[in-house]
Amino acid sequence: MRIIIVGGGGVGFALARLLSGENQDVIVIEKNHELARSINEELDVMVSFGNGASVNTLEKAGIKNAEMLIAVTEVDEINMVACMLAKKYNVPITVARVRNPEYYEGSSILTNEQLGVDIFINPERVAAYEIAKLIRTPNVGDTEYFAKGQVKMVSFIVDGSAKLIEQPLYKLPLPQETIVAAIERKQGDIIVPGGNDIIFPGDKVFILGKKWVLNDISWLLQKKESKSIKVAILGGGRIGYQVASMLESNSKSNCNVKLIERNVECCEEIASQLNKTLILRGDATDLSLLEQEEIQEADVLVAVTGDDRTNILASVLAMQFGVHKTICEAVNQEYIPLFHKIGIDHTISPRLLTAAQILKLIRKGEVLSMYLTEDGKLEIVELNVSPEAKVLKKKLQHAGIPKGILIGAILRKGKVIMPSGDDTILAGDNLIIFTRPQMNKHLDQLFAIKNGGKVKKSNTMR
């Protein structure tokens, strides 16, 4: 698939790197000389210098043969103009990064077709959504649903008192309807495990199971959920404001929220739009302020200042104060391994989240949904089994599925099967598969996944 990316900044660069790794034909349009040179040197993609809202620039980039255009500059209007022009060249799918909700939340007098945008994306809103989800489940990390909501995946950090540690997986006291689908070590290594693998304290464990079994995982964690969650948000930018707004609007979240922002005008603007959140003006790394505001009483600290160094320092200070859970924004995804090493519980990368959303659009037609972990090292794919798949009518233990790919669940005619080695795969089954990105070629071969599937269009992503 030929994909044109307009804008080679943080989001555009992350997209280009991820999509080129998927063996897509990627062309990046960038008008900044230094950025264009950096992309050309670091990535295996074509770079076209110029303005992405220019007809001449788009034609030089091969717009006539493009199958998708993704416009992710910092300017909403440029992104939409690029999409409008792409539609004039009959580009099937156009995606625009748009921060102003007036353009896509029903208040615009122009329709999506008139704007030329099939799908709007807002990286900050996607990041805020993920953070709010993490806050609502303080003892749980990632939470995702598959198989039309019948299958649930949760992740959590294992402590020394959990029942899961230091014994082979096949000996664990797990219900039949659940499976340990992946393990992430402290060092950041991802394991798609077999029965003999062992969980250690500090590991991040991904468990897949029927929804009703995993609705309450206290039997795994040996912890009680807090009735009221105290949240400290550091940074009142787009992400911080939207996290606070989402927590306020959800009556079930039961959160007591403080937001610290150093800019006076920003504080005043946020205070005029939020009703329940306590807005404080100050520096997120000011020790005296953190002590005065009793940061040690917080259940969750969210560092979203827009600056990696400030986020890291604030998170480390919070951990020293004894804050139970830290969620940190990573502006530069290269820092994500460092965040893990210093003990930050969850890292949110708006760029990587956006890239994962786009990746769902360009993946093969049999792929129904896809989830990418925060560091991009693990993919959870839900796909429909083709009649040409090599694994058909074979027991899983004899299907030639390599280590690094795990079939976590099968949805067959509305029924969820948590498979064992004796189960077989049939055409039309929906599978939930845990895999590392480097195993995608094996995935394609095993399940006869083809290119060029139709993309389901929607107004927005989250």
Image (cartoon, rainbow, N blue to C red):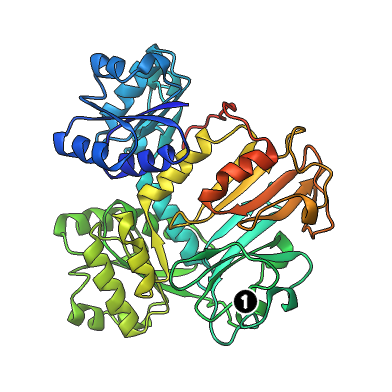
Residue closest to the eye, 76 or 347: 347
Q: What residue is at 25 percent from the left and 56 percent from the top?
A: 306
Q: Tell me: 381 left or right of 320.
A: right
Q: Residues within 10 Å of mark 1 (few under 14, many from 20)?
A: some
Q: Tell me: 129 left or right of 173.
A: left
Q: Secondary structure at mark 1?
A: loop
- The number of numbered badges drawn on the structure is 1
Res. 283 image quadrant: bottom left
Q: Position of residue 183 (x, y in %)?
A: 56, 67
Q: Looking at the image, which residue sits at the far bottom? A: 161
Q: Position of residue 368 (x, y in %)?
A: 63, 39
Q: Tell me: 75 left or right of 20.
A: left
Q: Is residue 302 visible?
A: no
Q: Is 244 drawn above or below residue 167 in the view shown?
A: above
Res. 384 image quadrant: top right
Q: Is 392 drawn above or below residue 263 in the view shown?
A: above
Q: Is 200 drawn above or below residue 8 in the view shown?
A: below
Q: Position of residue 7 (x, y in %)?
A: 27, 34
Res. 103 image quadrant: top left
Q: What residue is at 41 percent from the left and 37 percent from the top?
A: 20
Residue closest to the eye, 162 or 213: 162
User: Mark 1 = which residue?
Assistant: 198
Amino acid type of the residue that numbered disc 1 sits on in the rendered structure = Ile
Q: Position of residue 342 (x, y in %)?
A: 34, 75
Q: Is residue 72 visible?
A: yes
